[in-house]
Image: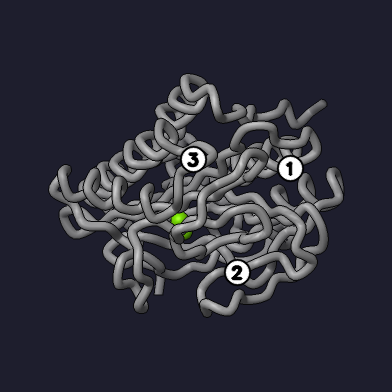
Amino acid sequence: MIFYKTEEEIVLIRESCLLVCKTLAHVASLIRPGVTGLQLDKEAETFIRDHRANPGFKGYRGFPASLCISPNEAVVHGIPSKAEFRDGDVVSVDCGVYWNGYFGDSAYTFALGDVKEDVITLLRVTNTSLYLGIEQAIPGNRLGDIGYAIQEYVERRHHYGVVRELVGHGIGKNLHEEPEVPNYGKRGRGVKLQEGLVIAIEPMVNMGKKEVTHAEDGWTVIARDRKVAAHYEHTITVRKEGADILSDHSGIEEEVRKNKELKPVDVLNPAL
Ligand code: MG
Ligand code: MG
C-alpha cells in the first residue's frame, strides 16, 4: 500500500533529507585519500546525533553503520571499513536519518584524486540520469516513465549497465515503503504518479555489465565484472507543478569544489 503524504508530513521529510545532505556535505569536506570509511562513519553519526536526530541505517535489518560506503566496484550497501581510500578511488556514500518520525535518504558518489576521465564520465552520466528521472515525476505520468528516462540515457545513449536487483522506493515513516522505483522500465507503465507521493530515486549504474553479486560480508553489492559503479540519490515529492526535490546536493557540491583532493562531478546537458 502506498502512503501519500500530507503537506505537514512533507515538511518533516524535507527536514530529514536536508540533514542527510548536510551530513553528506560534512563527509565531502573530509573524504580524501588516506581517510577510512570507519572515520567518516563516526563523523557522520556524531554529526547526526548532534542535530538531535538518529542515523536511519544503523540497525536497519542489522546494518552496522550510519553510512553505506561503497568504493569502486561496490555498487551500494558497503559497510564502512578500516581500509584507507586511495588516489583514484570513486566512493558512493549513502546516508539516512530518522527525525521527528520521518526518514530522509540521499546519496552521492565522490571522485578522489586522479580519477580517470572515463570514470568521471560514468559519474556525470549517472548524476545526470537522476535528474532526467526526476523530470518525469509529474502528475499523470507513471513510474515506468521515470525508469525509462534513466535507462534510455544510461544504457542506450551511454552503453553502461543499469542495476536491476536494487531500486528506489517510497519513503516516510519507514525507510523503504511502496512503491518500488526501478531505474529501468517502459513508458506509460506502472503506478500513476500523483500529488503526495514521496519517493527516493536512485540510479545505480555499472561501467561494465549490469549484473551484480554480494560480497562475502553479506551486505555489499558489487559489480559482477568488478568494474566501477556509481550511485546518486534524491528524495522527491510529486507536485502539481512537477517534482519537488526534498534533498539538496548543492551544499555537497560546494564542499566538493573546496576540497582540492576531490574532482567535481558536473551534471551534463543531456541534449549534447
Ligand atoms: Mg540511500
Ligand atoms: Mg534509498
The x, y position of residue 218, in whole percent, is: 52, 79
Give the residue at x 35% y 77%.
62
- Secondary structure under badge 2? strand
Tell me the amino acid under the disc marked 3. Ala
- Cα distance, mark 3 to mark 1? 25 Å
- The quadrant in which residue 177 appears is bottom left
Q: Position of residue 64 (x, y in %)?
A: 35, 70
**Disc 1 within 8 angstroms of ligand 1 (CB):** no
Q: How is the image coloured?
A: one colour
- Label pair 2/1, CB-CB below 8 angstroms: no
Determine the quadrant in which ligand 1 lies. bottom left
Q: Distance of mark 2 from mark 3, alpha carbons?
A: 29 Å
Q: Which tag, 3 or 1, sits closer to the chain's start?
A: 1
Q: Taking 193 as reference, is 265 above or below it?
A: above
Q: Would you say residue 197 is visible in this rendering? A: no
Using a 10 Å C-alpha cutoff, classify the residue at mark 3 as few (fewer than 14 neighbours), some (14 to 19) or many (20 or more). many
Residue wearing tag 2: 221
Residue, disc 3 = 243
